[in-house]
Image (cartoon, helix red, strand yellow):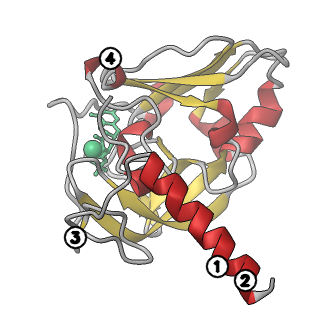
C-alpha cells in the first residue's frame, strides 16, 4: 500500500471510531492484555457457590437440539474421541486475566461433526451440573481454540475449576465457558444464559470491553 493510501485508510478508521463514540481508555490495552484487565499469576475460582461432585461413572454429556444425531456421551466415550491441546489466555469480566492456560480435551468441532447440526442451527446453549447456563453464537464455537476441556496443565481439571469437563472459549469473557458442563444444545433462536439474563453482555468480547448489556 502506498503511504498516501495508508494514511487515508487510517484517517477513515479514526473518523469511524470518533463517529462511534470511541474515546481514549483509562486503562490501556497491551498486545495481550485486553483493556481494563489486570494480569493474575494465580487462578481465582468463580462459581455460583456450588461445586457439584460428579463421579466419573455417573458423568454424561448430552448434545441435542437442531442436530441429525443427538448423543449422550459417557466419560469413556468422551475420552475415546480425538484429543487436542491448546494454550490460551483467560479473561474474566471481573477484570482478572490469566495467560498461558494449557487446556486439553476434545475440540468443539469434533462434537459438532459427531452430532451433525442441521442448517438452521445458529446458536449454542450450554448447561451445567450447577444449573449454570450460557449461550454463544455457533460461528464463534467453531474456532479451533474452542474446547471441551478435561485437563488443565497436564492434570485432570479440579472440581473447583469445573471438572470433570468444562468449555473454553478463549476469545470471549470466561463466563461464556461453562464449567461442570452437562448439556450442549444447538438452537435456531438465541436463548440467554444465567448471566446474560442478569445484565451481562450477550456477546462478551474482552477486546471491546463488552462487559454488560
Ligand atoms: N457452571 C459454571 N460455569 C461457569 C461459572 C459458574 O459459576 N458455573 N462461572 C463463569 C465465570 S464468571 C468464570 S470467570 C469462569 C471461572 O472459571 P474458574 O473458576 O476456573 O476461574 O467460569 C465460568 N463458568
Ligand atoms: Mo467471570
On the image, numbered disc 1 is attached to which residue? Answer: 7
The residue lying at 64 percent from left, 46 percent from top is 79
Picture coordinates of residue 48 (x, y %)? Answer: 19, 30
**Residue 54 found in image quarter:** top left
Circle nearer the N terminus (4, 3)? 3
The numbered mark at residue 4 is: 2
Circle nearer the N terminus (3, 1)? 1
On the image, numbered disc 4 is attached to which residue? Answer: 197
Depth check, mark 4 against mark 3: the one in front is 4
Question: Is disc 1 in contact with disc 2, using a CB cutoff of under 8 Å?
Answer: yes
Disc 4/disc 1 C-alpha distance (Å): 43 Å
The numbered mark at residue 164 is: none
Between residue 131 and residue 192, name the one nearer to us: 192
Question: Is disc 4 in contact with disc 1, using a CB cutoff of under 8 Å?
Answer: no
Q: Residues within 10 Å of mark 4 (few under 14, many from 20)?
A: few
The residue lying at 29 percent from left, 32 percent from top is 53
Q: Residues within 10 Å of mark 2 (few under 14, many from 20)?
A: few
Picture coordinates of residue 124 (x, y %)? Answer: 60, 25
Amino acid at each position: 500500500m502506498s503511504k498516501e493510501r495508508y494514511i487515508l485508510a487510517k484517517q477513515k478508521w479514526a473518523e469511524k471510531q470518533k463517529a462511534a463514540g470511541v474515546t481514549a481508555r483509562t486503562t490501556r490495552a497491551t498486545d495481550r492484555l485486553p483493556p481494563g484487565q489486570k494480569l493474575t499469576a494465580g487462578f481465582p475460582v468463580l462459581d455460583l457457590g456450588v461445586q457439584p461432585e460428579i463421579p466419573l461413572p455417573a458423568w454424561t454429556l448430552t448434545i441435542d437440539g437442531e442436530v441429525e444425531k443427538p448423543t449422550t456421551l459417557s466419560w469413556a466415550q468422551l475420552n475415546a474421541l480425538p484429543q487436542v491441546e491448546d494454550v490460551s489466555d483467560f479473561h474474566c469480566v471481573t477484570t482478572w486475566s490469566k495467560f498461558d492456560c494449557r487446556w486439553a480435551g476434545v475440540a468443539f468441532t469434533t462434537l459438532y461433526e459427531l452430532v451433525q447440526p442441521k442448517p438452521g442451527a445458529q446458536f449454542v446453549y450450554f448447561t451445567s451440573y450447577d444449573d449454570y447456563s450460557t449461550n454463544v453464537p455457533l460461528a464463534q464455537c467453531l474456532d479451533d481454540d474452542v474446547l471441551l476441556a478435561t485437563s488443565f496443565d497436564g492434570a485432570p481439571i479440579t472440581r473447583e475449576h469445573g471438572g470433570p469437563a468444562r468449555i473454553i472459549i478463549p476469545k470471549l469473557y470466561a463466563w461464556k465457558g461453562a464449567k461442570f458442563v452437562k448439556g450442549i444444545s444447538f438452537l435456531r433462536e438465541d436463548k440467554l444464559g444465567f448471566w446474560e439474563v442478569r445484565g451481562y453482555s450477550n456477546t462478551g468480547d474482552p477486546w471491546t470491553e463488552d462487559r454488560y448489556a
